[in-house]
Image (cartoon, helix red, strand yellow):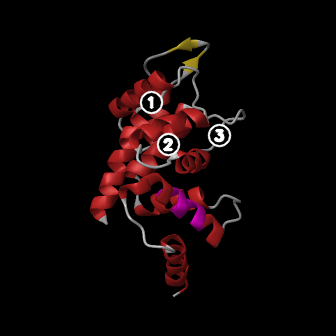
Amino acid sequence: MNTDHHSLQHAYAAIFEKVGASYRDGKRHSKLTADEVAELTQLTHFNPKELNQWYRGFLQDCPSGSMMEEEFCRIYRQYFPFGSSDILASLIFKAFPPEKDGTVGFKQFVVNLSVVLRGSTDETLKWIFNLMDRDRDGYLSKDEVTRLVDAIYKMVGNMVELPPNSLQNRVNNLFLNASE
């Protein structure tokens, strides 16, 4: 399990590293301001050097200053080419707090990335809960959990042979174990 978590962190780091951009006052900047670095250092588990590296990577892929869902899915697809990763990528993208226009800026992106890669167990569990709780009612239904597990199954595609009814059995076991 620990190895799987470590591998998943590396995969997410590679995906998120490919994402990019921000504009201030209509001009593209290759570095964050000192105030932005100070704020993001407080909000994330990254140091100033890492924040500037993430920012440069963000600038490469999203020169508009914000990331759209289609861009995130395209980048995600590059790292999971053996199955259909669009559903999972879309669910992950929707877990980011959006701007008014539905896009995600660097701040939202890097704060979420920090939780995924370096967050405490509690932070990571809250992030995963938010990822699954699509109707934002504070509870997870079997349908919400099934949706995420199904998206993961589709992402791995034919890399893993799954027994019949595996998806529903896994979800039922999760709910059974949670109720004990």
- The residue under label 2 is 111
Question: Reading the chain from its start, which is encountered first: label 1 or label 3?
Answer: 1
Residue occupying image coordinates x 69% and y 59%? 136
Q: What type is the residue that disc 2 sits on?
A: Val
Residue occupying image coordinates x 58% and y 46%? 90
Question: Reading the chain from its start, which is encountered first: label 2 or label 1?
Answer: 1
Mark 3, secondary structure of its residue: loop
- Nearer the observer, 41 or 108: 108
Q: What type is the residue that disc 1 sits on?
A: Val
Q: What type is the residue that disc 3 sits on?
A: Pro
Q: In this rendering, is residue 55 above or below 114?
A: above
- The residue under label 3 is 98
**Which residues are drawn in magenta?**
145-152
**Labelled disc at residue 37:** 1
Secondary structure predominantly adopted by residues drawn in magenta: helix
Query: Is 153 colored magenta in this rendering?
Result: no
Q: Is residue 38 left or right of residue 104?
A: left
Residue 69 pos. (x, y %): 60, 37
Q: Nearer the viewer, mark 1 or mark 3?
A: 3
Disc 2 residue crowd, few under 14, some 14–19, many 20+, Cα 10 Å: some
- Nearer the observer, 155 or 109: 155
In three-dimensional space, the C-alpha distance between marks 3 and 2, rounded to whole angstroms, equals 12 Å
Residue 127 pos. (x, y %): 52, 56
Q: Is residue 28 visible?
A: yes
Disc 3 residue crowd, few under 14, some 14–19, many 20+, Cα 10 Å: some
Mark 2, secondary structure of its residue: helix
In three-dimensional space, the C-alpha distance between marks 1 and 3, rounded to whole angstroms, equals 21 Å
Residue occupying image coordinates x 55% and y 32%? 71
